[in-house]
Image (cartoon, rainbow, N blue to C red):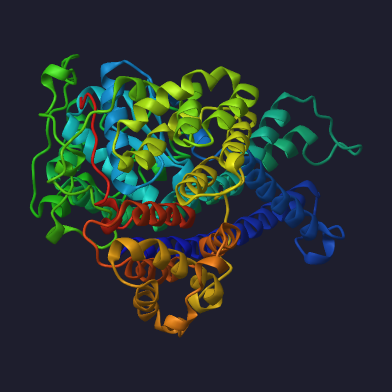
């Protein structure tokens, strides 16, 4: 199953979630009406149950109140989670790790996350640590891959080796790339809504217990205090229907995805002992300290379907468990039964430079071409020489305001430099003096490092308040417009930057186009652009490259004559085409990307300009970078702890 099939599977699981949620609501409404009917009967002395005896609108009122509680709870929780991954991480008690952190264990974690992000061509996620949790666990959360966060427990930092930590992060990147995260956040909101009845019942019980109730005038029947208490007790009991359905829904959508994420972690790292070792230590920690993957935070149950391992033990295991048994997961990873491992806290200097692995490029943690599954991006090719980032660049990508200066430095030109620096003196005086210094340092790096630098700077840039992000994007636009033209390099940087920092981009993009042929004109624009950019490096006419791309999408019925001339293309058209392509159904996107790759030619390695453009298009489509594109970029590492 490839990346796009996984995305489509996530969408179909959303439909399953809606069906199960609807069944849960129907069951709760029916139970509330039955319970309220019995309470009403109890309050009427000598009453014989019968529909005619109920007040007018009795059942309609019960139903309306129940639906209002469920809908209100869902909307409130979804509003609370409007910040996506950040909100979920804070809900679990996570602390944001500063990209500039000098803590050895946190530095090791940040480096591993950066490796995975660069390899997959996505923005580097923010990283959180749950400081009060000694168990081994982790989760990824967010509405899309451009605003994802990765959260790990303190126990994962102190008890796992670098390989094991890398396996855990690979597992979480699977959830980021396969479309699980948005579904998981929706699940939190929906389940909170259907469990609102229990909360309302608890409040009625508390109020009934504390109030001074009086009997009816004829001193017959139960007191108001008793009525409230019994009503609350009934609703609290009914609330467990919501809990039952909640567990059922979470089990229905999460268990198989854990198996897939485990397999993907092995494929990512080419090392079963990475994720396998982490799971074995979870098993050993459960046996020796009754800790394992257990999370102490009170929101652990609500977030249980997000975690690497089950955060709470429960009597309702098996069918209703959100996670498969550890031994079954290990059997699938190793192909046989294996013993669990002890998980003592490792020495404090385990991640220090003296104890680190030998300096190797990111590619060394990738997997061989023959073993590469079609839905995962490559970590590069092992023949690339590993390079270390200059200290000034390494520092700049980890601090928010310096990262802004680095973005401006990436946009600094030669002919228009004085004009651009004048814009910066006015628009960004705090960064203006730093920009030329960083531009000089960037100039000493290969051009293939430019987009990876932007990926690395994303966690720092995302720490900026929305107003500062808007100012950054506006200033970047002014720098680009300084010479009254838009170059390909500027368009690529602008596209990636906007997709990843614009607060309105990528949050809840609807699927408006089910088939690629619905975007025939947009496909002409994108294929024509790629063909014209790739033609000089490929040494063949743009029309031939366009025809190659058209052959990969027979449903479009395009030919070489449909190639748009350079004069007929402008970047406004391209932006519109990318916006439309972003709204394609998941299973329609692979055909477009394959066509674009075909139109890029067969050059090996792929020319940087072509690779940059394809990387920007993938960012706009929220798709991982294909191996042929990823192989263009030199791999970097720094203080690989």
**Going 37% across and 53% down the picture, which residue do you hit?**
609
The answer to whether residue 14 is above or below residue 89 is below
The answer to whether residue 604 is above or below residue 291 is below
Q: How many marks?
A: 0
**Going 50% across and 66% down the picture, which residue do you hit?**
566
User: 180 or 596, which lies in front?
Assistant: 596
Quarter of the rendering containing residue 303: top left
Q: Residue furthest front?
A: 415
- Give the left or right position of residue 570, taking residue 168 as reference: right
- Give the left or right position of residue 394, taking residue 589 as reference: left
Q: Quadrant of the C terminus?
A: top left
**Going 52% across and 64% down the picture, which residue do you hit?**
581
**Image spot of residue 584 (x, y percent):** 51, 67
User: 58 or 462, which lies in front?
Assistant: 462
**Image spot of residue 129 (x, y percent):** 38, 26
Q: Quadrant of the N terminus?
A: bottom left
- Give the left or right position of residue 145, taking residue 28 as reference: left
User: 341 or 469, which lies in front?
Assistant: 469
**Image spot of residue 214 (x, y percent):** 84, 30
Q: Is residue 124 visible?
A: no
**Image spot of residue 571 (x, y percent):** 56, 57
Q: Is residue 503 visible?
A: yes
User: 192 or 197, which lies in front?
Assistant: 192
- Give the left or right position of residue 69, taking residue 394 as reference: right
The answer to whether residue 67 is above or below residue 546 is above
């Amino acid at each position: 199953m490839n990346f796009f099939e996984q995305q489509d599977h996530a969408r179909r699981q959303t439909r399953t979630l809606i069906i199960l949620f609807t069944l849960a609501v129907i069951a709760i409404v029916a139970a509330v009406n039955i319970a309220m009917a019995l309470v009403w009967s109890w309050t009427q002395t000598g009453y014989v149950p019968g529909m005619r005896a109920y007040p007018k609108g009795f059942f309609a009122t019960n139903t309306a109140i129940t639906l209002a509680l469920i809908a209100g709870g869902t909307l409130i929780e979804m509003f609370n989670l409007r910040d996506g991954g950040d909100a979920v991480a804070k809900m679990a008690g996570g602390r944001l790790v500063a990209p500039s952190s000098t803590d050895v264990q946190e530095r090791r974690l940040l480096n591993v996350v950066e490796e995975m992000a660069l390899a997959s061509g996505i923005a580097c996620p923010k990283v959180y640590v749950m400081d009060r949790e000694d168990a081994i666990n982790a989760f990824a959360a967010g509405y899309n891959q451009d605003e994802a966060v990765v959260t790990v427990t303190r126990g994962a930092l102190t008890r796992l080796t670098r390989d094991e930590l890398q396996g855990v992060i690979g597992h979480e990147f699977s959830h980021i790339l396969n479309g699980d995260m948005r579904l998981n956040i929706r699940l939190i909101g929906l389940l909170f809504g259907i469990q609102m009845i229990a909360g309302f019942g608890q409040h009625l019980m508390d109020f009934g217990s504390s109030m001074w109730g009086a009997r009816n005038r004829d001193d017959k029947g139960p007191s108001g205090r008793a009525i409230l208490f019994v009503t609350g007790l009934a609703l609290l009991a009914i609330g467990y229907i919501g809990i039952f359905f909640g567990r059922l829904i979470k089990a229905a959508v999460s268990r198989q995805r854990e198996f897939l994420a485990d397999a993907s972690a092995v494929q990512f790292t080419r090392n079963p002992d990475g994720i396998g070792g982490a799971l074995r230590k979870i098993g050993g920690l459960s046996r020796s300290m009754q800790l394992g993957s257990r999370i102490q935070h009170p929101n652990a149950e609500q977030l249980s379907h997000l975690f690497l391992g089950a955060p709470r033990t429960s009597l309702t295991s098996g069918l209703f468990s959100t996670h498969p048994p550890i031994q079954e997961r290990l059997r699938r990873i190793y192909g046989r039964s294996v013993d669990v491992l002890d998980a003592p806290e490792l020495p404090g200097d385990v991640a220090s430079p003296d104890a680190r692995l030998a300096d190797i490029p990111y590619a060394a943690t990738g997997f061989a071409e023959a073993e590469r599954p079609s839905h995962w991006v490559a970590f590069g090719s092992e023949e690339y020489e590993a390079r270390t980032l200059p200290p000034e660049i390494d520092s700049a990508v980890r601090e928010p305001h310096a990262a802004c200066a680095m973005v401006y430095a990436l946009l600094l030109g030669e002919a228009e430099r004085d004009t651009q620096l004048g814009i910066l003196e006015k628009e960004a005086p705090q960064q203006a003096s730093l920009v030329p210094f960083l531009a000089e340092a960037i100039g000493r790096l290969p051009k293939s490092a430019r987009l990876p630098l932007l990926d690395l700077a994303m966690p720092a840039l995302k720490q900026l308040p929305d107003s500062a992000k808007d100012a950054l994007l506006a200033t970047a636009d002014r720098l680009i417009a300084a010479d009254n033209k838009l170059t390909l390099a500027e368009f690529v940087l602008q596209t990636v930057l906007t997709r990843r920092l614009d607060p309105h981009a990528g949050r809840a993009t609807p699927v408006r186009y089910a088939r690629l042929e619905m975007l025939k004109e947009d496909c002409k624009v994108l294929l024509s652009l790629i063909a014209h950019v790739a033609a000089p490096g490929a040494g063949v006419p743009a029309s031939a490259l366009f025809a190659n791309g058209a052959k990969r999408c027979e449903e479009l019925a395009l030919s070489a004559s449909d190639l748009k001339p350079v004069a007929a293309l402008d970047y406004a058209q391209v932006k519109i085409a990318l916006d439309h392509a972003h709204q394609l159904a998941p299973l329609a996107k692979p055909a477009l990307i394959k066509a674009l790759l075909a139109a890029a030619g067969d050059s090996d390695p792929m020319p940087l300009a072509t690779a940059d453009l394809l990387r920007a298009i993938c960012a706009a489509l929220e798709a991982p970078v294909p191996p042929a594109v990823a192989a263009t970029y030199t791999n970097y590492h720094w203080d690989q702890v």
